[in-house]
Each structure stands twice: as structure tokens, then as C-alpha cells.
Amino acid sequence: MSERFSELAWMLREMGIGPLWRRRNGQGGPTTDAIEGQAQAKAPHGVGVLPPARQAAPRGAHAPDAEAERAEAIDIAALDWAGLESAIRACRRCKLAATRTQAVPGVGDRKPSWFVLGEGPGEQEDQKGEPFVGPAGRLLDAMLAAVGKRRGEGVYITNVVKCRPPGNRNPEPDEIAACRPWLERQLALAAPRLILAVGKFAAQTALGREDTVAGLRARGGPCVLAGSTAPVAVTYHPSYLLRTPADKAKAWEDLQRALALTGGDSSGCTASPPQQD
Ligand code: URA
């Protein structure tokens, strides 16, 4: 087995997807390298609250006046990547600034094909200043690798909110609204071909629709955030998939759809259709 093939097989196994087939001379048609690992069944989906489209950043108790004035004075549309990242790191537009260790702007290729949008930093991300570095990040990396993508190479990763919600609670509508201008500027600078929204909050924010992940992933649509009209592909959040591995098969389908939208192939490998219970 080639090194690349073994690597891919491992990543698919991480996702609970398989078996993996190697194309013969890139012509398609399965050969013998089958790797076991099946995904099964279904799981419930949550319903969430769609943040208001554009809402003034909350101020007051959490943003001392001088700082709030400075933040308001920034011409976000004029910021380059470096300016944007330092503005995000200094941001005090919402109450999350009071409890974070640091803001987590994003990581990766600044002219990406895929723009991966998560929910918000967790504990490890808050400590390290990089998105998706904990267990969910390991699964996200495996998901990306399974379709021939790698963090930092053609992929940019960020979150709807750049600061950790305490105790990993869900981000609140005012926090999502306060962070939205940063996200919109990131999208304008990155100009991705596709936005992969992972989880409910990312999908609702990018699509501007209040629905379950199941509903949103079925339809996708254009991004409603200023800064991009790229198509939005929706899949389950890796943290959810860690708790509900049966839905990894659906995530695999989502990734294949996303890949097709950007005209890619998964490096000569295809997985067999996932089994359903
Ligand atoms: N979950 C997210 O949504 N984002 C992270 O950066 C880490 C975990």
C-alpha cells in the first residue's frame, strides 16, 4: 500500500468511513485494498436561534467606553490580514472579551479554496490561540484529509465567534452579531470558492436561515454574509460527530458534495457508500 493511500485509509477510519478503494491508474473501479470501518444510523438534530442579520455591537458593561470608541472607529473594510488579526485580538465588542484567555482569529491559507467556519473556540483553542486544535480539531483535520485537503493548504479555518464562550456554552445572538464584521472582512479578504459551515451556528450564520443542521445541509445555498457569495456547504460539527459517530457517514456525503462544488477529486480514492441501518 502506498504511503498516501495508507494515510488516507487512516483518515477515513478516523471518520468511521469505509471501505476505501484505490482506483486503478486513476480509471476508477475498485481493487482489493478494502479497509473496514462502517458508519451507521441516524441521530437527532438541534434547533437553534438565528442571530439577527446586522445588529450594532453591544457595548456598555463589557466594553469600556474608550475601547469601544476605538473599536467603533476602525474602518474594518480597509483592514488587511495583519490589521484584521490585531483588531480581532484587541476586540472588546462583546462580553466574551471579559472571560477569554485570548481571541482566536483564524488559521490557514489566506487565499483558500475552502473556508471552514466553526462555532467558537473551546478551551484548548482559547489557550493556544488557534481554532480546532482539540479533539474536534483532530477529527476536522481527518475529514479534510479524507477529501485531499489539509489545514493551511488551500484551507482557512475560523469560527463564527472568535472568543471562547465560557464553559463551551453556545454562542449567543449578540456575540455572533458583534463578531460578524470580523468574519465578513475575513471572507472578503479570503475570497474562497466554498464555505464549509460545520454545525448549526456556522450554517445559520452563513446561510441566514434558521433551521436544523439536517435541513441546512440538505439544501446549502449562497452565503448571505457581506464579503462573499460563495456557495455554503453544511455538515455536522466535529464535536457532534465525536458524540454521534453514526452520522459520520452523512458528513462524508457532505464533504463529497462540497468537493464536487469546487470541482475537486479526492486524490484518486473513493469510499464505498456508507451503510445505513
Ligand atoms: N469547536 C469550534 O467550533 N471551533 C473551534 O475552534 C474548536 C472547537
Image (spheres, rainbow, N blue to C red):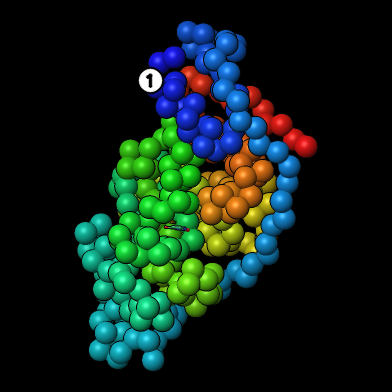
SS for tag 1?
helix
In the figure, residue 16 lies in which quadrant?
A: top right
Q: Position of residue 53 (x, y in %)?
A: 53, 70
Within-10-Å neighbours for mark 1: few <14, some 14–19, many 20+:
few
Q: Is residue 90 above or below residue 156?
A: below
Outermost residue, right side: 277
The answer, for residue 236, to whether it is visible in the render is no
Residue, x 38% and y 37% (percent of image)? 150
Q: Position of residue 125 (x, y in %)?
A: 37, 60
Residue, x 71% and y 51% (percent of image)? 43
The answer, for residue 90, to whether it is visible in the render is yes
Q: Quadrant of ligand 1?
A: bottom left
In the rendered image, the quadrant that contains the C terminus is top right
Q: Is residue 133 above or below residue 143?
A: below
In the figure, residue 40 lies in which quadrant?
A: top right
Q: Position of residue 73 (x, y in %)?
A: 27, 79
In the rendered image, the quadrant that contains the N terminus is top left
In the figure, residue 212 lies in which quadrant?
A: bottom right
Q: Which residue is mark 1?
A: 3
Q: Is residue 41 left or right of residue 163?
A: right
Depth order, front residue of 124/174: 124
Q: Is residue 211 left or right of residue 21?
A: right
Residue, x 52% and y 32% (percent of image)? 12
Residue type indicated by callout 1 = Glu
Outermost residue, top side: 25
Q: Position of residue 63 (x, y in %)?
A: 34, 86
**Is the residue indicated by label 1 positioned so its CB lies within 8 Å of ligand 1?**
no
